[in-house]
Amino acid sequence: MPDKVLIIDDDASIRKLMTKVISCNDLTPVTANNGEEALKLLKETTFQLVLLDIMLPGIDGFQVLKKIRYLGIKTPVIIISGKTEDYDTLYGLDLGADNYIHKPFNPIVLGAKIKALIRRDKQAHGTEDSGTTLGPFLLDNKSMRFYKNEEEIFLSAKELIIIKLFLEHPGQVFSKEALYEQAWGDSIVDDNAIMVYINRLRNKIEDNPKLPKYLQTIWGKGYTFSISN
């Protein structure tokens, strides 16, 4: 599956140009025309790179970048902006951007920088499939160690199976039958076992297990996992 690149820009012509650059480099473009939409996408989907404009409606690009890093999302970010002052460049890099490119840009050069940054990030973190991330959570698929905000949380084997399923399918509702079959390999469901493991996970990953914001119950249907606002 091609790597995904999130394009955040309110200018339709720029989004169109960036989309072409991304597609021509065998990557999958996803677009957002404002910061709120972009943050929602970033909480629900794993991207390999973000292209971020600064002058956005609502919250500006600098605020978007702050929020991205606050959420623990380590996806590489290239700021692409018409703001050319040294102060803006330094400020963006200080907030956690990996590069700062001025508009107008050369599409060929941009494509080369995108591929180089994605390749460097993969090398720094191992292979492409070495980890599954969502918001503040990371599951290392090699060691099967689980982290929240870079702090390790110890999970049992079945808890790891369940959390991996949730992280790889954010927002999807899983029935008790689906969860039991994945974790126990049996189609005959033990409702009590499911509830016990859901509660254990909540106690380990939620700030307030009694008011869960990540692992939600969808009454009559099952459970879903997502990053709340």
Image (cartoon, rainbow, N blue to C red):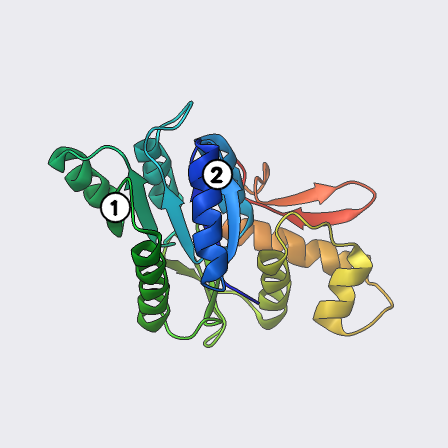
Residue 157, position in %: x, y?
Answer: 59, 72
* Among the two numbered marks 1 and 2 on one chain, the one whose residue lies closer to the N terminus: 2
Q: Secondary structure at mark 1?
A: strand
Q: Is residue 61 above or below residue 176?
A: above
Q: Amino acid at mark 2?
A: Ala
Residue 138, position in %: x, y?
Answer: 45, 60
Q: Secondary structure at mark 2?
A: helix
Front in this rendered view, residue 85 or 46? 85
Q: Which mark is residue 101?
A: 1
Q: Quadrant of the N terminus?
A: bottom right
Residue 16, position in %: x, y?
Answer: 49, 42
Q: Amino acid at mark 1?
A: Ile
**Mark 2 surroundings within 10 Å by alpha-carbon count, few (fewer than 14), some (14 through 19), many (20 or more):** many
Residue 47 visible in the shown view? no
State left or right for residue 95 relative to residue 122.
left
Q: Residue at the spot x=81%, y=62% of the render?
A: 190
Q: Is residue 222 above or below residue 193?
A: above
Residue 161, position in %: x, y?
Answer: 62, 68
Q: Which mark is residue 38?
A: 2
Report which quarter residue 216 is drawn in: top right
Q: Is residue 36 above or below residue 68?
A: above
State left or right for residue 51 relative to residue 62.
right
Front in this rendered view, residue 184 or 119? 119
CA distance separating discs 1 and 2 = 19 Å
Q: Residue at the spot x=54%, y=38% of the render?
A: 228
